[in-house]
Each structure stands twice: as C-alpha cells, then as structure tokens.
Amino acid sequence: MFDILIKNANEIVKEDGILQGDIGIRNGRIECMGNSFCKELSHAQTVIDATNKTVLPGFVDCHTHLVYAGSRHFEYELKTAGETYSSIHKKGGILYTVEQTRKAGIEELVEKGLKDLDIMLQHGTTTAEIKSGYGLDEKNELKILYTIKVLQKLHPITIIPTFLGAHTIPEEYKQNRQGYVNLVKSMIPEVKGMVEYCDVFCDKLGFTYEESKEILEEASKHGLKLKIHAEQTGYNQGAKLAAELKAVSADHLDYITEKEMEAMKQADVTAVLLPGVTYHLTELIPGNKNQKRFLPRKVRTMIEKGLRVAIATDYNPGSCRTQSMKAIMEAAARLYRMNNREIINAATINAAYALNRANEIGSIAVGKKADLVVHDCEEHGILVDNFGVNLVDTVIKDGEVVYQR
C-alpha cells in the first residue's frame, strides 16, 4: 500500500517529457509513475484525484532575502516614475532595510518569516534558500541566521541558509571599506556551522572584484560553498570570479559577457536569473533611464550556449517583493522570452542544481523525494499563461500532504 497515490493526472511533467496517469509515493519517495506501474497497486492511505490536473515538482526558490523587517513599498512609485535602482540605493535602499532589521527582535522576524514561508508553500515552493545580509554587523547577522535556524525547525519548506554579510558597505564603514571586508571575513568562522553557502554582492553598489574574491576565498577555506551576486547594475567581473572559484551559482547576470558565459559553463556554474527584479525595477519599460533592452537576447544566448539556467524570486523588500515562483515564471516568459519547458526546468531541476540538490529534488523521477505540487490546470502551459492567479491545489512535501486548497 502506498502512503499517497496521485491518480489520473492529465500531465505529469518530468524533466524530459510528459506522462499521464498515477504517481505512487511511499516512505517519502516516488516509487512509481504512469499507468503501467501504478494500476496494480491502486490502494493508498491517501488518494488524491488529479483528474484534469497537472503535477509538477515542487518549485525550488534558490535565491531569497526572506528575513528582514520593515517595508520599502514607497520606493515602488519612484521606480515606476523612472528613478533608477542605483539612485534609490543612495537614498536608502538596502541600508534602510538594515536599519529596520537591526531594530527588530527575533520573535518579530520569525513571525514575519513564517507568514512569508506559508505564502511560498501555498504557491508551490517546497525548497527555498534564505540569505542573511540585512544585519551588516556581527550581532545582527547572527540574529538573522538564528532566525533562519528557527524557521528551519518550524516550517515544512526545506530551507538552505546562506551568509551574505557582504551585501553592501554599512554606513559606519563608508570611509573604511577594508575594515568592513575584514569584519566579514572574521564572521565566517562564527557562522560556518549555521550556513551552507557564502555569498557576496559583487557590484558597484556592493563589493569590488578584489574584495569579493578575498571574502569568498576565506569562506572556501572554512568549507563553505560559494555563491555570488554578479553583473546586476553593470559589469564588475563577478561572473568571471564565479567561474574562477567554481561557485555553485552566479545570480542576476544582466551584464554578463559571452566570454564569461563560456567560462561559467566550463566551471559548471549555474546561472540564476531573477526576472522579477527586471519586472519590479521596470528595467524593460521605455522611459527607464537604465532600460535593459538587451536582456531577452542575452538570456537566449546563455541557453543556446548550453549554460544551465535557473530562475528564482530574489524575494526582498526593495527590488522584488514577491514570494510566488509562478509570478517569476510569468515574468520569465514575458520579459526574457523563455519557452514553457525552459521556464519549468529553470524553476525546478536547474534551481535544484543551484543548491547542489538535483540528485534529490527538482524533478519527478523514481527514487527522488516526493516534493510534488498538483496544479488545477489541464496542461503545464496554462501555469505560465494564466498570469496573476494561484493554481496550486495540493502540495506534497517529503511524501506528506502539507497544503490543500
């Protein structure tokens, strides 16, 4: 007897094709799928009728900044009026959120974090990476990482913690950049037992190539895997550094060159695109001073070169305030001209590669973890086409039903 049997799915979307029929789940794993394997074992403790519905892997949100306090909704009017991200950053931006987060207690951060995770789960996310980075001193970075640890224990979504002490230079170190780089490096031994990854914002709004390399090399010495924010607001050699250090992923990549695409491919670095940022910062709207009309062509070049492309929300209070991977999939289609198959793989199996978990999650395959989502639509393309609507019917995490509409 199965623990869960999903019956009569109109589409079971695999990494390399589509099936119809059933999925049998036992002991948290996918045991069989399709008509021929599951019909003879049709009894289960829980039966989910997926008639006229589509089953996908749970979404893997491989880049978020979920733990923060305060709101920056007032910035959105400035963006839609044509103000650039760089100019907003000078007035407040990340540092405004740092100020608010430093004032917040752990209970407040946990309460807000659980609400955010609930929204993510209801929209089909079953694994999420969460970065620190709104503390920017040892006390508050540790506070954020402790909050993430509490969230790991309290919520069914699998949470992957990342240390981003190198998010930007805090106000008190504006005249002493090297002093802050040294502080971040000194934090690494303190946080290494709490995180899996170390990330750096390698950008003119954050850290130089040399500063980023210094921090990431220190993290690598302490056994942390590497990620890097690269080429978001301009070319800063971040993608080059990701390839040199064999980072697991490089994220944003708006200004990446073809040379670095090749280098990242050779180094097996996953390219994480953040189309919600392009949307929320109005970067493809005529009239924006920093309009990035080159992005669809650049994304197509990455795919044609065989670079592994993932997408993520980058959920944060400033440049992309959404917890919904479906919204990100819609944005990837409209802004980057990715097709449905590319988008679904980017939100599932490729995003799992960006967290070193592709052998366990991110696709529907016998033996993999049963992280599955039943969507109330007959075909997978409707997920991308039916914008602004949540179609999640049932979420299964580690072989257990954790959400039903």
Image: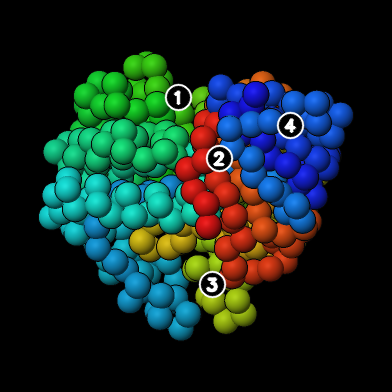
Going from N to C along the chain, the mark reached first, 4 or 2, is 4
Going from N to C along the chain, the mark reached first, 1 or 3, is 1
Q: What residue sits right under mark 3 in the picture?
A: 282
Label 1: how many Cα within 10 Å (few below 14, some 14–19, many 20+) = many
Q: Residue at x 59, y 55 (%)?
A: 393
Going from N to C along the chain, the mark reached first, 1 or 4, is 4
Q: What residue sits right under mark 1 in the picture?
A: 225
Q: CA distance from mark 2 to mark 3?
A: 35 Å
How far across and down, in percent of the image, does residue 214 sit?
Answer: 36, 28
Which quarter of the image is occupied by the N terminus?
top right
Nearest the camera: 351 or 388? 388
Which residue type carries mark 2? Ile
Which residue type carries mark 4? Ser
Which residue type carries mark 1? Lys
Q: Nearer the viewer, mark 3 or mark 4?
A: 4
Q: Residue at x 19, y 53 (%)?
A: 108
Q: Residue at x 17, y 45 (%)?
A: 106
Q: What residue sits right under mark 2 in the picture?
A: 396
